[in-house]
Image: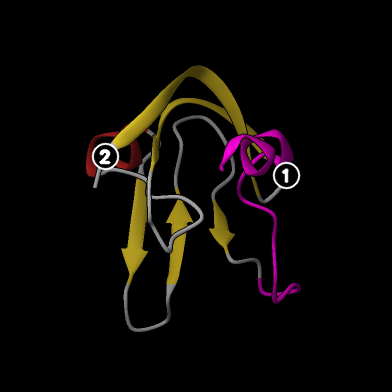
Amino acid sequence: MSCNEVCSKYPIVICGKEFITNFLLIDNCNFDIILGMDWLSRVYAVTNCQKKSMIFQILNQPKFKFPREDRIVDQVIHPDIVQMIP
């Protein structure tokens, strides 16, 4: 894998909540987005591999679950990122 471009301080939306992160655009990757353990720990994300879900327990905010139970598909990445990928 090789990295084409870095997107610094880019907003992403997960379950209607906006987060700022840095992206590395990777060639030949079959994933829409890969969120690293360091970033996930900063937003207090707890992963449930069995249910393929995450619970975000950010300090002083109500916790929320991804994917939301009321929606099967949710937008994770910002639409501009998709346009940047060759």
Residue 22 sits above or below residue 52 on the image: above
Across the whole image, how many numbered discs are drawn on residues?
2
Say which amino acid is labelled 1: Gly
**Which of the 4 image quarters holds residue 61?**
top right
For the C terminus, the image quarter is top right
- The magenta segment is 69-86
Q: In the depicted view, which residue is nearer to us: 2 or 14? A: 2
List the single residue furthest toward the front. 86
Q: Main secondary structure of the magenta part?
A: loop
Estimate the x, y position of residue 4 in percent, counting from the top left.
38, 30
Instruction: Tell me which residue sits at (44%, 45%) in the image.
Output: 57
Residue at mark 1: 16
Label 2 sits on a secondary structure element that is: loop
Estimate the x, y position of residue 30 in percent, counting from the top left.
42, 64
Residue at mark 2: 2
Residue 84 sits above or below residue 67 on the image: above
Q: Are marks 2 and 1 in contact (CB under 8 Å)?
A: no
Residue 1 sits above or below residue 49 on the image: above
Say which amino acid is labelled 2: Ser
Q: In the depicted view, which residue is nearer to us: 18 or 58? A: 18
Label 1 crowd bin: few (<14), some (14–19), many (20+), radius 10 Å: few
**Which of the 4 image quarters holds residue 80?**
top right
Instruction: Tell me which residue sits at (69%, 39%) in the image.
Output: 83
- Tell me which numbered mark, 2 or 1, is placed earlier along the sequence: 2
Residue 26 sits above or below residue 18 on the image: below
Quick check: is 56 in the magenta stretch?
no
Q: In the depicted view, which residue is nearer to us: 54 or 34? A: 34
Estimate the x, y position of residue 31 in percent, counting from the top left.
44, 60
Q: Is residue 6 left or right of residue 72?
A: left
